[in-house]
Structure formats: structure tokens, C-alpha cells
Image (cartoon, grey):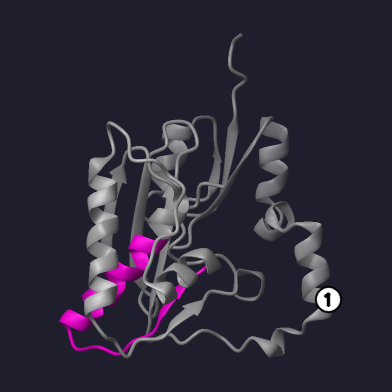
Amino acid sequence: MEKKPKFYTVWEGRKAGVYDSWDECKKQVEGVAGAKYKSFDSKKEAEAALKENYWKYTQTQSTAKKQAKIPASAFPPPVLESIVVDAAWNSVNKDMEYQGFYLKTKELIFHKGPFPKATNNIGEFLAIVHALAYLKNRNSNLPIYSDSRTAISWVRNKKANTKLDEANGNPEVFELLDRAEKWLKTNTYPNKVLKWETDYWGENPADFGRK
């Protein structure tokens, strides 16, 4: 069966607009901190979306209800002097990559991957540990933000509780997990690892924008 074409709306990237292929969209958003875009089934839908707010097309009903119950004042703005991390996972080829940005300037600090046959949770976990090691090497006590509660709990427990089986093609992933867990068990750090509150602050600036 012939694959139905997609159209991509880019609200924030190198150049906002509507693009008729992923390759063209990727040129506008890859490596851009906080890039905002979404795919649509028709060009008409994509063009209409461009004229409206990104969050109208990405915010779920449950999120809207949650915001109605909890006032934004309950979540003061994030600390600008911080590092924010995120991961991306391709559901088709199972590739994973992760990156970290300095929040105040949106400067890319590190980007790793893609790594084959991994998971998004693993990427989120490795991103936090990478940021912790990066800051320790620089004697910095900056906080780290992640939007993954799972990864934050893994870091707290010093153990990646993944159900992924080690298989041919992904030994590097398990080597990285082993190194990360050993680092957590043999190092102390003053840095707080905090939850990025997407519902109130907007998309994680380290997000890869592949919604």
C-alpha cells in the first residue's frame, strides 16, 4: 500500500512554514532548541494550523483539565542558570539519541547518538547522568531539568530499571548504562535533578521536536 504523504507545520525553527516532506521539515528543526512542529494529513490542515497556536494542536484535554485545577502560580518559572536535557526515540528503527542545553542561552552543550535498539527512558536516564558528570567535571552546582519522571527516579535509585533485553546490535547501549550506574554509585553531587513542568512552562527546550 502506498504511504500517504504528510505535511509538516513548523511554528518555531529556522524558518516557520509548511513543508511537504520530513526531510525539508528536518532542516528547519533539527538542532534547534525548543523547535515546535507537527505533522498533518493534508496541506490545508497544516496551513490552517500555522495561523494558530502550537499548543492548540498538541495540548490534550486531560492537560487542559489539569491546568484548570492547578494554578500556574504553583509552578514558578524554571531557574535559567541550569541545564535541560531530553531524549528522542524512533519508534520505527528503535534508534535513540539525547542532548542537553544551557537553558539561559539555549546553547547546545552535548548531543549523543543515535544509538540502535534502545528506548526513550534509557535516553532520558543517560542524558541526566551525562549532565551530572559534565557539571561535576566543572565544579558546577547548576540544577538539571528533565521532563521524565521515570528517568529522574532511576537516577535517584542509581539503577536503570529497563526491561530492554540486551541483543545483537545494541552492546553500546548496555555499556553506557553500566557506566552511568557505576558513576552514580561512586560519585556524589550537589546538583538538584528537577522535573520540567511542560504543562506550565511549555515544551522542554532540549526537546527534539518530533511530535
Residue 66: x %, y % from top left: 79, 71
Q: Is residue 109 visible?
A: no
188 is higher (above) or lower (below) than 198: below
Mark 1 neighbour class, 10 Å CA radius: few under 14, some 14 to 19, many 20 or more: few
In the rendered image, which quarter is residue 142 located in? bottom left
Look at label 1 and name its amino acid: Ala
Q: Residue at the spot x=66%, y=39% of the render?
A: 46
Q: Which residues are magenta?
A: 125-147
Q: Is residue 206 visible?
A: yes
**Lateral position of residue 160 relative to residue 109, left or right:** right
Q: Is residue 130 magenta?
A: yes
Residue 136: x %, y % from top left: 21, 82
Q: Residue at the spot x=69%, y=89% of the render?
A: 74
Location of mark 1 (residue): 68
Q: Residue at the spot x=40%, y=72% of the render?
A: 155
206 is higher (above) or lower (below) than 83: above
66 is higher (above) or lower (below) than 192: above
Q: Is residue 134 magenta?
A: yes
Residue 113: x %, y % from top left: 28, 48
Q: Nearer the viewer, residue 151 or 84?
A: 151
Q: Nearer the viewer, residue 198 or 150?
A: 150
> Which secondary structure lies at badge 1?
helix
Residue 129: x %, y % from top left: 31, 69
43 is higher (above) or lower (below) than 65: above
